[in-house]
Amino acid sequence: MSLQLGRTSFGNAANAGNVLTRDAAMQLFNSWVLNPKLQLHMLQVGHLMRCWAAEHEMLDDAAQWRWEMAGLLHDADWDQWPTEHCRKIIEELESRNIDPEIIRAIASHGHVYFGVEPVTRMDKMLYAFDELSGLIHAYALMRPNRYEAMDVKGVKKRLKEKTFAANVSREDIADACTRAGIVLDDLIAFIIAKQATV
């Protein structure tokens, strides 16, 4: 099964700035994503994207929502349409005339699978948060106090254990940090701090 999208251009430049309202995004989210674990992952990634946009990119509230929306909907079609993953949500957002920056970020969150390289800051951070946030959450579920007192050292130990959260690509995590120009320890610390508040 190939998930390659076969294109690298998405949406219409004339739609720059167009977003779904939060209510409309959540309606799409709730109707497409039925798996509670996947819902949590997507909420976590959306939250991380908003926090990063605010604290590191210094973006205004409207731009923060664009980043959050990309994270919130990046896996929207995985639950019910895994063989159409990425393609279906991209086509849905294009049909709704959504900002191409958001659509492209979703298209590039797994460049090995979809064939779209992460280029913009939004692209790169969505790629960076996706795999690593999942591994950190899996680690939290093992711990009696979840995220409380979790440290970078503990997460890195789990990263080195290939059998732990084996479906999480260590190569993608390393690649994402390199592309985004972020030190792995700093990214882990950010995710621990922000993911604990979701």
Image (cartoon, helix red, strand yellow):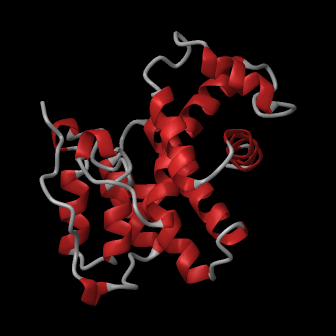
All told, the count of numbered labels is: 0
Residue 131 showing in the rendered view: no
**In the image, what residue occupies the spot 39% across and 56% down?**
118
Residue 187 occupies quadrant: top right
* In-image side of 43 versus 104 (left or right): right
Q: Residue at x 38, y 68 (%)?
A: 102
Would you say 84 lies left or right of 161 here? left
Please name whichever residue, 126 or 78, is drawn nearer the observer in this view of the structure: 126
Residue 50 placement (x, y as % from top left)? 60, 64
Q: Is residue 12 above or below residue 116?
A: below
Which x, y percent locates residue 54?
68, 71
Task: Identify which residue, 7 or 192, lies in the foreground.
Answer: 7
Does the rendering let one see residue 56?
yes
- Left or right: 127 in relation to 197: left
Pinpoint residue 146: horizontal percent, then vertical percent: 75, 28
On screen, residue 107 versus residue 44, left or right, reads: left
Residue ranking furthest to the bottom: 14
Judging depth in this view, the residue of 167 and 112 nearest the camera is: 112
